[in-house]
Amino acid sequence: MSFLSNLTWRYAEQHFDSNMQVSNDHLHQVLEAIRFAPTSFGLQPFHAYVVNKPELKTQIRAAGYNQPQLEEASHLIIFTSKNNTLERIEEYIELTSDGNPEEKEKLQEYKNMMTRSLGKLTKEQAHNWAKKQVYIALGFALAACAELQIDSCPLEGFINTEINKILNLQDTEDSTVILAIGYKKDMPHRPKVRFPEQELFTQL
């Protein structure tokens, strides 16, 4: 199947077969798609918690308005956004330079540019900026699942503060969106509905 055919194939699954598990190899490929997703400045201001333990999924379902996907899915990928932008810049420069002082010096102008751009953000603004990057990564994960014929469902309906407690998050992180992945129960889908091209696109 082609990439576009795979996107037509995928649906936001409402029920998963809890007896079927995503293989470690396929899970790794989905996580690699997240890791290689583009982000602003390449800073990747997010973290993804991969949940497979039944007892944790039960807790998360309770915090997610009892949505069955949160317990039935093979794995939950919980994306958190980070607001520690200046610290992230330092980490990025250290990683890019491999700790080499000369390479750090070459990156100084880029570091200054990032600092000027992001250093003026409030904590709330930094979180909002990071959330935008999370959704880019989520899109790549959804595409990877479709490519691998893994069923999936992105979920925003959960009590954010409760998920933060379950994951024991620090105040630099905030749960943003959950991706449930696995294999659907053998249930028919309604035809996929999308607005027509003329409604969505204008060529100028």
Image (cartoon, grey):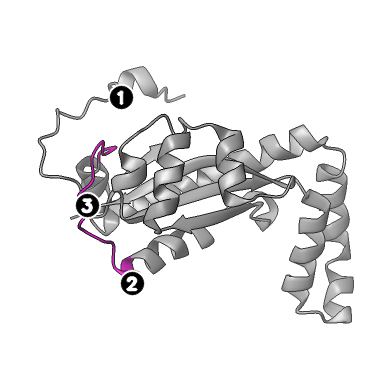
Is 20 magenta? The answer is: yes
Residue at image point 33% right, 51% down: 181
Q: CA distance from mark 1 to mark 3?
A: 30 Å
Q: Which residue is mark 1?
A: 197
Q: Quadrant of the N terminus?
A: bottom left
Q: Earlier in the sequence, mark 1 or mark 3?
A: 3
Q: Secondary structure at mark 2?
A: helix
- Between label 1 and label 2, give the one nearer the viewer: 2
Q: Write the start and end of the magenta stretch as one range.
A: 11-26
Q: Secondary structure at mark 3?
A: loop
- Residue reaching furthest front? 55
**Residue type, label 3:** Tyr
Q: Position of residue 185 (x, y in %)?
A: 15, 45
Q: Dot 3, crowdedness within 10 Å: few (<14), some or many (≥20)?
A: many
Q: Is residue 22 visible?
A: yes
Q: Position of residue 75 (x, y in %)?
A: 37, 55
Find residue 64 and name its label. Answer: none
Q: CA distance from mark 3 to mark 2?
A: 15 Å
Q: CA distance from mark 1 to mark 2?
A: 36 Å
Q: Which residue is mark 3?
A: 183
- Between label 3 and label 2, give the one nearer the viewer: 3
**Residue type, label 2:** Asp
Query: CB under 8 Å between callouts 3 and 2?
Result: no
Q: Secondary structure at mark 1?
A: helix
Find residue 25 and name its label. Answer: 2
Q: Is residue 76 visible?
A: no
- Between label 1 and label 3, give the one nearer the viewer: 3
Is 30 magenta? The answer is: no
